[in-house]
């Protein structure tokens, strides 16, 4: 079913992920109406993220007194790196850069890298508000990670394998999203949470003047804010092989379907983002552990029973 | 290269703006905010995110303002809006300054004293006349200029006259971008920026902290960190400064710092119709209701922004601007009602704000609180609901031509011995200790005291 990607796919992967992230950010800008004065064209809104990126590239970097610059920069750099490494196990159609036997675990490990990344970035500048932001991501991680892992496990259970290509293979005829809806929904929630974006933008909240990103300007800021879009794109893309049948579909080639489904998932997340205020970790925690954990466990139980009776 | 030449223009197209409101300058703030909305310029939550610094009101020579400016990365520009009518012109100027690479007549970190006249005459090159302060071309220069400005967040220091931008103390960063770091490691009364010979900047070597500093920072787990919040935080009552003690992100104590009084000779903007009527001028009820409605929309917009819900926050602020520009009540009513009902209906918002900052009516009455905070008789969400209800009522009363006789302003009775906002502040401060930072911000935003009212009963 799956085949190894040619070597040239390795350098192409980050570029493709960046393009996807820029497209997602552009779509967000267009539907958000946040940028662009009334009457400004779609084109102006769509190019806003790209313009902002260029602006940040040309902007001076700040340093703060007695900052732990090295640590902060390690954190900043880790955000996009974690996103790219996570995307390495996402199949494009039926080809993926890497297909380890523990692909799902690999993906999960990379997102935990993001925890470290944001926390280090918040710690680095030696500033209260950014430190609060960094800690907030740990609190948020504590809340969303357990249900998230159960959701991932459920997909692995259904396929009886942690290898991503085999998870795709197991969805012949019936997507996991159809018979594991709770796991799919929880996965989408945590996809947004691990990208610390939208309703889960708590670590970078406006109430702490930007939190983890409060003290960064220029390319530093770009790494963190751009890395967040990369993460969101990677997690949305990973939901396709996990729950949406991977590259399956009529007419189009496999990679075309992957692209289309990823775009659809991203569009749903971007549009749904507007419906909710920021979910503070301290409240979400209760919901995640009291509602989502039992829900995903029941979902996993259901899937396990089905698999045993096949 | 052509691209390099195009970058300043690019930066000037929609620059993120850090808007700082001076005491008493609500009218100017509203003018600038409306103007920013119209242009689609984003507002920056802090100096690091900003390309333009816009001061609403008379900047004077506030130390913290200079420090805030020093914390902004280049390219940057500064304008002041001393009169509400100047806002469009000032923002045009800001755009021109940015695209030409000039910075405007920047505020200095040392008290300049002299009030500024017209906004930015351009050409001034900010406070960075000391050696080793490169432009954005950043050359590496060894050593650094020691912080000569306030070191916020120091233990056992009253912080008076110290840097208070953004709720962070700040020091002179090394060259690059002048940091606003609240030295977590400075909680030991240690000065900052003892020269590390390597500035971390483009192509530079990342500066590793000295061991001694790392020890200091470790103390944070045990320390209470004292820091001033305000006056320039985003979505924060303009000019208010709270001295808080933090342990992690939990507030241990909160006190109001002596505030800078709003300039005399002006009524507080939001209480103006009632104060004018009390002073014997003819004011219609309709005009007062319009102002009340706008005031609550302003508060609701701020509350929603603090709770991280940008879309309805922006809608509330747009409606507020249109109300103040005199749009007809009939035209606005449907939109206002859609907004208030949508916000009131949001279960998520109710779940997120339930149980925060409880102020029972009995306790409120003891404290002399009147107005929405008294009527709410409950938590943050109850106060929000009262605002929404009053907005709906006010919308229908905006065409009332009768003379205004009441004294019930948007924040409470304006004929009491103390201005309502002072009472609100006194009532909310005891609710802050024990709250997490985010919750404390929500509690404050749900009372939304207006520092313009602090000075007194507003004798114009």
Image: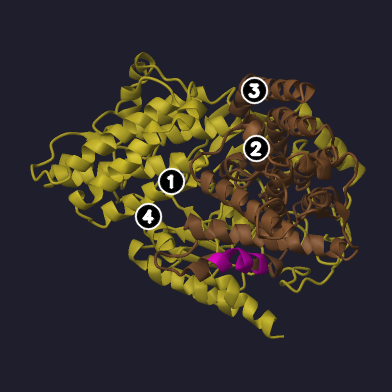
Chain colours: A brown, B yellow
Residue A219: which numbered mark, if any? none
On the image, numbered disc 3 is attached to which residue? A295
**SS class, disc 4:** helix
- Mark 2 and mark 3 lie on one chain; the one further toward the N terminus is 2
**SS class, disc 3:** helix
The reply to whether residue B164 is visible in this rendering is no
* Label 1 environment density (alpha carbons within 10 Å; few <14, some 14–19, many ≥20): many
* Extreme residue toward the left, this view: B402
Q: Are marks 3 and 1 in contact (CB under 8 Å)?
A: no
Q: Is residue B278 left or right of residue A250?
A: left
In space, the residues marked 2 and 3 are separated at their CA atoms by 15 Å
Where residue B207 sits, quadrant-wise, is bottom right
In space, the residues marked 3 and 1 are separated at their CA atoms by 33 Å
On the image, numbered disc 2 is attached to which residue? A177
**SS class, disc 2:** helix
Q: Chain of mark 1?
A: B
On the image, numbered disc 1 is attached to which residue? B313
- Looking at the image, is mark 3 or mark 4 nearer the viewer? 3
* Label 4 environment density (alpha carbons within 10 Å; few <14, some 14–19, many ≥20): many
Q: Are marks 1 and 2 in contact (CB under 8 Å)?
A: no
* Image location of residue A251, percent across then percent down: 65, 59
In space, the residues marked 4 and 2 are separated at their CA atoms by 48 Å
- Looking at the image, is mark 2 or mark 3 nearer the viewer? 2
* Label 3 environment density (alpha carbons within 10 Å; few <14, some 14–19, many ≥20): some
Q: Nearer the viewer, residue A144 or A187?
A: A187
The reply to whether residue A13 is visible in this rendering is yes
Relative to B66, residue B3 above or below: below
Q: Chain of mark 3?
A: A
**Magenta-drawn segment:** A46-54
């Amino acid at each position: 079913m799956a085949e190894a990607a040619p070597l040239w796919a390795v350098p192409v992967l980050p570029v493709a992920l960046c393009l996807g992230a820029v497209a997602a950010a552009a779509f967000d800008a267009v539907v958000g109406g946040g940028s662009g004065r009334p009457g400004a064209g779609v084109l102006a809104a769509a190019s806003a993220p790209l313009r902002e990126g260029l602006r940040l590239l040309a902007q001076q970097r700040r340093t703060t007194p007695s900052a732990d610059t090295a640590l902060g920069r390690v954190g900043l750099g880790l955000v996009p790196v974690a996103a790219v490494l996570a995307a390495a196990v996402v199949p494009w159609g039926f080809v993926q850069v890497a297909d380890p036997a523990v692909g799902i675990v690999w993906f999960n490990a990379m997102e935990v890298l993001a925890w470290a990344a944001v926390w280090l970035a918040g710690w680095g500048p030696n500033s209260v508000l950014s430190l609060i932001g960094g800690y907030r991501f740990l609190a948020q991680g504590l809340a969303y990670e357990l249900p998230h892992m159960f959701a991932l496990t459920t997909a692995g259970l259904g396929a009886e394998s942690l290898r991503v290509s085999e998870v795709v293979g197991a969805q012949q005829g019936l997507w996991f999203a159809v018979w594991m809806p709770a796991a799919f929904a929880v996965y989408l929630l945590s996809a947004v949470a691990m990208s610390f974006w939208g309703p889960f933008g708590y670590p970078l909240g406006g109430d702490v003047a930007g939190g983890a990103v409060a003290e960064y300007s220029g390319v530093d800021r770009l790494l963190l804010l751009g890395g967040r879009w990369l993460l969101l794109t990677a997690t949305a893309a990973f939901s396709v092989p996990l729950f949406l049948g991977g590259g399956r579909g009529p007419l189009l080639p496999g990679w075309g379907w992957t692209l289309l489904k990823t775009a659809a998932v991203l569009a749903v997340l971007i549009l749904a983002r507007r419906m909710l205020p920021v979910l503070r970790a301290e409240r979400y925690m209760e919901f995640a552990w009291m509602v989502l954990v039992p829900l995903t466990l029941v979902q996993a139980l259901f899937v396990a029973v089905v698999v045993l009776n096949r | 290269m052509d691209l390099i030449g195009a970058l300043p223009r690019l930066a000037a197209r929609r620059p993120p703006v850090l808007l700082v409101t001076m005491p008493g300058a609500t009218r100017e703030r509203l003018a600038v905010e409306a103007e920013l909305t119209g242009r689609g310029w984003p507002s920056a939550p802090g100096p690091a995110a900003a390309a333009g610094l816009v001061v609403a009101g008379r900047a004077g020579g506030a130390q913290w303002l200079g420090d805030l400016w020093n914390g902004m990365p280049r390219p940057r520009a500064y304008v002041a809006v001393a009169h509400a009518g100047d806002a469009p012109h000032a923002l045009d100027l800001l755009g021109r300054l940015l695209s030409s690479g000039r910075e405007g007549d920047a505020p200095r970190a040392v008290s300049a004293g002299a009030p500024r006249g017209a906004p930015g005459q351009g050409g001034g090159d900010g406070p960075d006349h000391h050696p080793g302060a490169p432009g954005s071309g950043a050359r590496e220069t060894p050593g650094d200029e020691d912080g000569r400005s306030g070191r916020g967040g120091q233990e056992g220091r009253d912080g008076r006259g110290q840097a208070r931008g953004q709720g962070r103390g700040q020091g002179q960063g090394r060259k690059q971008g002048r940091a606003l770091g609240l030295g977590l490691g400075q909680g030991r009364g240690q000065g900052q920026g003892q020269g590390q010979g390597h500035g971390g900047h483009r192509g530079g070597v990342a500066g590793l902290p000295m061991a001694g500093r790392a020890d200091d920072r470790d103390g944070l787990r045990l320390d209470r960190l004292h820091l001033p919040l305000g006056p320039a935080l985003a979505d924060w009552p303009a000019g208010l400064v709270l001295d808080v003690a933090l342990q992690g992100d939990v507030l241990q104590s909160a006190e109001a710092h002596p505030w800078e009084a709003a300039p005399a000779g002006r009524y507080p903007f939001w209480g103006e119709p009632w104060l004018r009527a009390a002073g014997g001028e003819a004011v219609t009820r309709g005009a007062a209701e319009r102002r009340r409605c706008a005031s609550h929309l302003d508060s609701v917009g701020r509350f929603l922004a603090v709770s991280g819900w940008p879309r309805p926050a922006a809608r509330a602020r747009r409606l507020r601007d249109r109300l103040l520009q005199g749009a007809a009540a009939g035209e606005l009513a449907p939109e206002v009602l859609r907004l208030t009902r949508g916000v009131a209906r949001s279960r998520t918002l109710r779940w997120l704000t339930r149980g925060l900052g409880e102020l029972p009516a009995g306790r409120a009455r003891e404290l002399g609180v009147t107005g929405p905070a008294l009527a709410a008789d409950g938590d943050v969400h109850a106060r929000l609901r009262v605002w929404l209800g009053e907005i709906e009522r006010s919308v229908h009363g905006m065409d009332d031509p009768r003379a205004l006789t009441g004294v019930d302003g948007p924040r409470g009775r304006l004929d009491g011995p103390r201005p309502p906002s002072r009472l609100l502040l006194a009532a909310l401060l005891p609710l802050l200790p024990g709250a997490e930072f985010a919750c404390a911000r929500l509690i404050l935003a749900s009372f939304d005291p207006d520092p313009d009212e602090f000075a007194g009963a507003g004798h114009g």
